[in-house]
Image (cartoon, rainbow, N blue to C red):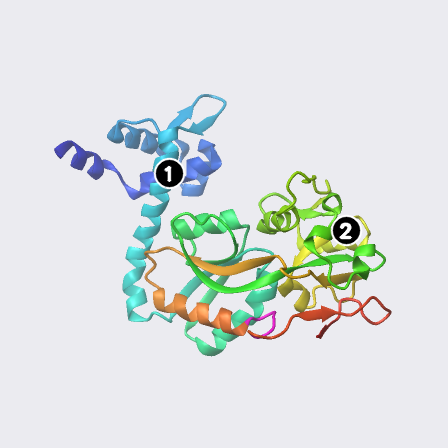
Amino acid sequence: MATLLSAANAVSLRQLSYVVALSETLNFTRAAERCFVTQSTLSSGIRELERALDAVLFERDRQSVALTPLGQDLLVRAHAILGQTLDFVNAAGAAAGPLEGTVTLGAIPTIAPFLLPGLLRQIRQELPALTTLLREEQTSVLLRAVAEGEMDFAIIALPMDVGRLQVHPLFSEELWLIAAEDDPMARLAHPSAAQIDVTRLMLLGEGHCLREHSLEACLSGRRGKQRSPSAIEASSLPTLVQMVEAGLGIALLPEMAIKAGFLVGSKVIARPLAAPAPRREIALVARPSTPRAPLLQRLQALAASGRIAGPARGARRSRVKTPGPSSRGETRRS
């Protein structure tokens, strides 16, 4: 017991932050710059931690750095400890004014442009004492930032492995098919996922969850018939739409993007897929230890009730006009 207590006392939060930084950069120089210390300080701090634990967390030589299996396991715990520590420090301020101060809210690129502007307006109206800092990143970056306490909450699309973070559902939305005006798929009123030629399906690049959701929607149920999607990939939604408009293929787009007018001015037609249409769940994620539970609940209510870029709950699905001179990107109620 005495040995364990001695080892525990020798571990510092700064050392844990060094471990996290080095695990993400796998480079001592960049990790030191991120921690605002010298390379020798970071290196010695990690060596001291390994001596205190009597364990090797990193394999390193002159050319490379890699986490050991034990290092991988302890890294998860280091993330949790750092996040809980920040929550401990922030708890006092949150208790004094749970709906005041500054909150950092993240969102993925396929949600941020369509949901955050309206949500931010609501926050300013209903929570005037709250300052909201926004950050747009891919899912993996947001999850890490929330877990480590760099960010309070993040809005992501499910299904997604969120680790130890808590999920607070907001709403669900469909994925719609988009195609160029002269594409045969654009002439189908309600194409089914089975009718989508996977070899023509263009995707966002690796790291975007819409990529995985699109693949799941189009490959699910095609046992023995799975084919590779188009080799053409986009780095962003605007680029994806431009490639569809150029006739290079077809794609799936979130319902909120279409109803926010994302296709207005383009020669791209959006079609809701036949039931059961593929969907993605939109949710807030937060640390279980967050001291800002009242604010989390308020943000959840605002985002879920507002449905900023979509119809109110219970509304019927929108339909897109058949291609024509005045129907580009327009929608109407059915």
Point out the residue furthest to the bottom here.
Answer: 125
Q: Is residue 80 magenta?
A: no
Residue placed under numbered mark 2 in the picture: 243
Task: Choose the circle earlier in sequence order: 1 or 2.
Answer: 1
Query: Which residue is painted at 44% across and 32% down in the image?
Result: 28
Disc 1, disc 2: CB below 8 Å? Answer: no
Amino acid type indicated by mark 1:
Leu
Image disc number at residue 16? none
Q: In the image, 65: left or right of 49?
A: right
Q: Quadrant of the N terminus?
A: top left
Query: Which residue is painted at 75% across and 70% down in the image?
Result: 330
Q: Nearer the viewer, residue 207 or 224?
A: 224
Amino acid type indicated by mark 2:
Met
Residue 79's x, y, as percent?
A: 37, 45
Magenta residues (range) = 307-312
Q: Is residue 308 magenta?
A: yes
Point out the residue furthest to the left here.
Answer: 2
Query: Which residue is painted at 24% across and 31% down in the image?
Result: 52
Q: Nearer the viewer, residue 131 or 203?
A: 203
Please say if 133 is above or below 200. Answer: below
Instruction: Tell me where residue 18 sits by quadrant.
Output: top left
Residue placed under numbered mark 1 in the picture: 75
**Callout 2: few (<14), some (14-19), or many (20+) C-alpha neighbours within 10 Å?**
many
Which secondary structure, mark 2?
A: helix
Please say if 297 is above or below 67. Answer: below
Residue 215's x, y, as percent?
A: 63, 47
